[in-house]
Image (tube, helix red, strand yellow):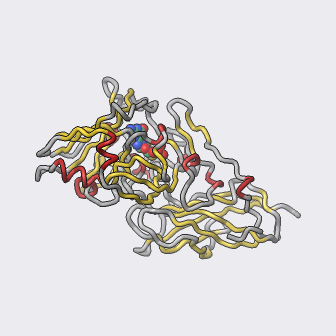
């Protein structure tokens, strides 16, 4: 990156920390204008928790695998650490990221741009555990349950406390990069990120990557839990009939990290617009930037190569206008199938899947 352009902060000058969206439980987001490295430093990685983080002792920890399996398992933390490991890089985005851009305002944590991050995860492939457990032929879903419990605040509320639980389909669970991870960026998970063990489901919105996982159940019916039906679900269409389906794959999306909303820029100066784009299971092939609120688009350049399940940082070397005034910047990515991000948010997703180009308003000053 050109270090002389107007948006550069030297490494020493970069403040590191998160923005509070909710204090208890911890819901914290990255100040997205701090996007520099391909790998998000752990201390800048967002935290999205429905209940307070449980305090799990690794010596007492057990992971059970039960349900429609030939061999029920109860594994200790050291059993899991002794198994062959795999490392992968994956972008996690919370399905509610950028909710603050919805108008009228939608209920839920008012995430700006920072409920997304890209980290290196190390753990045991989920498939390796499932092979030892031996799934019955009719297993369709793997339910992962966390040790955190509570009563969700949103209606319809369950009759009592429940654990955070989510399922993934059997075919996805067998993908080599779906991990039960114990390390993030080369260090043991931090408590807020799921210590001692969490799932990582690359390509899915973050809600599938269950933290503090202690129970796995092999199910022969599609799982209908709270975070599968009431929350983290959307309205789909089944032959003209609206049906509720669980959110799964991340949609194609791009975000501008710099400039920031309402940043004041000097006129006629080189300025590197910088951001990132990601998707669930498609490659990102193009990035387009609008400097005039969507009236026209120019192509930006990727900083990172194509890599499935990770974001690609991108940039556009702009010369700021000489004409002072307000300008609205937008970024829009295109996937390998040639389809760009949608122009508007799809209301069937409710307060989730905010994947349209997000307006960043800036001001060019007189001098
Ligand atoms: N797992 C448990 N047990 N409890 C949770 O509240 N939140 C989910 C997922 N896994 C959650 C969970 C959601 S909505 C997201 S976006 C990711 O964790 C966030 O992971 P992070 O906090 O490590 O960024």
Q: Quadrant of the C terminus?
A: bottom right
The residue sitting at 24% across, 58% down in the picture is 171
| 206 on left or right of 163 | right
Q: Nearer the viewer, residue 342 or 1?
A: 1
**Residue 121 image-quadrant placement:** bottom left
Residue 234 can be seen, yes or no: no
Relative to 159, residue 82 above or below:
below
On-image quarter of the N terminus: bottom right
Q: In the displayed structure, does residue 185 sit left or right of residue 349? A: right
Tell which of 111 and 356 is nearer to you. Answer: 111
Q: Nearer the viewer, residue 170 or 350?
A: 170
* In this view, 275 is above or below 29: below
Residue 196, image x, y percentages: 40, 40
Q: Quadrant of residue 221?
A: top left
Quadrant of the image where one finds ligand 1: top left
Which residue is farthest top?
A: 160
Residue 160 as seen in the image, left or right of residue 41: left
- Point 24% across, 50% down: residue: 129
Q: Is residue 83 left or right of residue 348?
A: left
Q: Position of residue 313 (x, y in %)?
A: 56, 66
Residue 17 placed where, x, y %? 63, 44
């Amino acid at each position: 990156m050109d270090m002389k352009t107007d948006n550069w902060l030297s490494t020493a000058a970069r403040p590191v920390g998160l923005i509070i969206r909710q204090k208890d439980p911890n819901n914290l987001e990255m100040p997205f204008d701090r996007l520099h490295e391909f790998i998000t430093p752990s201390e800048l990685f967002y935290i999205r928790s429905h209940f307070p983080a449980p305090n799990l002792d690794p010596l007492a920890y057990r992971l059970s695998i039960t349900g429609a399996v030939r061999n029920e398992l109860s594994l200790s933390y050291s059993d899991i650490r002794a198994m062959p490991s795999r490392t992968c890089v994956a972008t996690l985005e919370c399905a509610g990221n950028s909710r603050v851009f919805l108008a009228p305002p939608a209920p839920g944590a008012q995430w700006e741009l920072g409920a997304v991050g890209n980290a290196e995860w190390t753990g045991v492939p989920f498939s390796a555990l499932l092979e030892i457990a031996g799934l019955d032929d009719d297993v369709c879903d793997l339910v992962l349950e966390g040790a955190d419990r509570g009563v969700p605040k949103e209606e319809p509320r369950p009759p009592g406390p429940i654990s955070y639980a989510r399922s993934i389909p059997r075919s996805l669970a067998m993908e080599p990069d779906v991990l039960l991870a114990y390390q993030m960026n080369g260090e043991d998970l931090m408590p807020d990120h799921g210590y001692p063990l969490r799932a990582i489901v690359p390509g899915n919105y973050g809600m599938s990557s269950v933290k503090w996982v202690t129970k796995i159940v092999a199910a022969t019916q599609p799982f209908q839990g709270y975070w599968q039906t009431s929350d983290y679900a959307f309205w789909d269409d089944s032959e003209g009939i609206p049906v509720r389906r669980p959110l799964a794959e991340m949609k194609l999306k791009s975000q501008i990290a710099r400039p920031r909303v309402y940043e004041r820029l000097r006129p006629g100066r080189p300025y590197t617009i910088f951001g990132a784009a990601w998707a669930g299971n498609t490659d990102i092939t193009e990035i387009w930037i609008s400097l005039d609120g969507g009236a026209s688009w120019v192509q930006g350049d990727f900083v990172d190569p194509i890599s499935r399940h990770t974001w690609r940082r991108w940039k556009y070397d702009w010369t700021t206008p000489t004409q002072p005034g307000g300008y609205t910047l937008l970024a829009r990515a295109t996937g390998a199938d040639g389809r760009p991000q949608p122009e508007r948010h799809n209301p069937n997703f409710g307060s989730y899947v905010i994947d349209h180009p997000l307006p960043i308003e800036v001001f060019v000053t007189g001098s």
